[in-house]
Image (tube, helix red, strand yellow):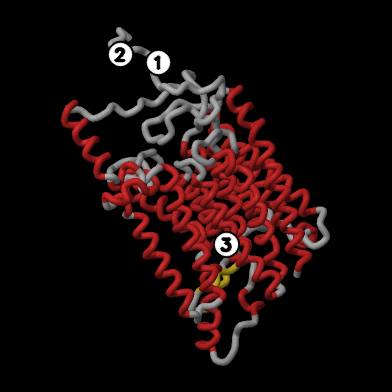
Amino acid sequence: MGLPVREYLLTLCVTVAVTYLLTGPVRKFAIAVGAMPEIRARDVHREPTPRLGGIAMFGGLCAGLLVADHLRNLNGVFTGSNEPRALLSGAALIWLIGVLDDKFEIDALIKLGAQMIAAGVMVIQGLTILWIPVPFIGTVSVTPWQGNLLTVALVVLTINAVNFVDGLDGLAAGTVCIAATAFFLYAYRIWFGYGIESAAPATLFAAILMGMCLGFLPHNMHPARIFMGDSGSMLIGLVLAAGAISITGQVDPDTLKLFAGGERNATHAMLPVFIPLVLPLTIIAIPMADLILAIVRRTWNGRSPFAADRGHLHHRLLELGHSHSRAVLIMYFWSGLIAFGAVAYSVHSTSMWIVLGIAGLSALGLVLLLLPRFTPRAPRWAEALVPPRYRHAERAAEAAALDASGTEPEPARPIAAGVSGVNGATAIGPRSRFPDRRKAGSAR
């Protein structure tokens, strides 16, 4: 058992290292070519930040596949299946469209067509859904046309779900990394635990996806020095969808040999295994919920489903009063709870501790979610031990200052593109401590 794990770990480390090392030069390249758009109304960052981070992530994908192809145990994935080549072909196409969009802002319908073509490229090479396991019914075979349509639909939905959630520093990469980790644990159990070789490609895709996200995250955490852009968000969405399609449509549940007794008992025994197979989107439940809510909200308001707005889940967390970092961590928490909860239930569905643990963590998540609605005040004897915003004296001073001036402090204005650089160390030089150097009362 240790040998496959070591090979997966080596593939993961190589993918992390290549992605991390490439991100710095890619950032300089993005600045040089002007892939640093101006601040938009829906953006939450205040300084122009370079995109094109997907270039480094695509380099990590290629490096991971190349290393895995030369490893003894993982080489069988390439010799026995055409799925890695199908993934690389579709990823290259969607990545190229993303790079062009990061630089030239391609129309949304053109991107949608490119996503469908990328999914079609994978379908032509064999990465498609062959059957669907349905709880209480069994394995349902689909016709080639039905499987192809389901594959394209799943790829497009997953790509756009990840793209929609990419609104805060480190949010998309971290959420997908959590989903890929949970998916790797499940796929590895199906492959090595049950000896099903057809689950090996999905396991490899999940390991490489983890490496792509982990290598990019240090550059993308708040304050982000580079964004992955559509070239990155669409790429990791496609890789995640490819893994889900591989293990859902290629692994025959009959080979798990869990059927025992009558048909009813066999269906009940298969239920925990059906959950991740039938519902692979549980690993990206948060991004998918955001996508569905965005489509309903925009359509209800008479707008195009592709029209950007500030109504996403992460925007609502900021409106509740959460800080940028805390909003990201809350999204991480819920993504991890749903993804790992589904995997844990698929392993031990009869354990009441798993159900109670999920319920307890959900309650904790709700408390953290609504925390800004409460304004706790520490007792006077403990004021020295808490942040200033929880002290009576600080609140009284702020209220007195507000009453004396009659106006609230003016919020900092976004910095126009070209005036200063990116978050952290700027692209051109050191960042000024003051967003506006003009003196008060200036004529300009």
Q: CA distance from mark 3 to mark 2?
A: 54 Å
Which residue is tagged 1? 437
Q: Mark 1 near mark 3, Cβ–Cβ under 8 Å?
A: no
Tell me if residue 299 can be seen.
no
Place residue 389 in its image quadrant. Answer: top left
Residue 264, percent across and down? 50, 87
Residue 249, percent across and down? 60, 65
Tell me if 369 is positioned left or right of 35 in this view: left
Residue type (three-letter) at the residue carrying disc 3: Ala
Q: Mark 3 near mark 2, Cβ–Cβ under 8 Å?
A: no
Q: Is residue 149 above or below residue 271?
A: above
Earlier-in-chain disc, 1 versus 3: 3
Q: In the image, which disc is placed on residue 440?
A: 2
Tell me if 121 is positioned left or right of 233 in this view: right
Tell me if 75 is positioned left or right of 206 in this view: right
Q: Residue at x 60, y 39 (%)?
A: 54
334 or 89: which is nearer to us? 334
Residue type (three-letter) at the residue carrying disc 2: Ala
Q: Is residue 409 above or below residue 387?
A: above
Residue 432, percent across and down? 47, 21
Question: Which quadrant holds the N terminus?
Answer: bottom right
Q: CA distance from mark 1 to mark 3?
A: 49 Å
Earlier-in-chain disc, 3 versus 2: 3
Question: Which quadrant holds the C terminus?
Answer: top left
Q: Residue at x 51, y 78 (%)?
A: 349
Which residue is tagged 3? 182
- Mark 3 element type: helix
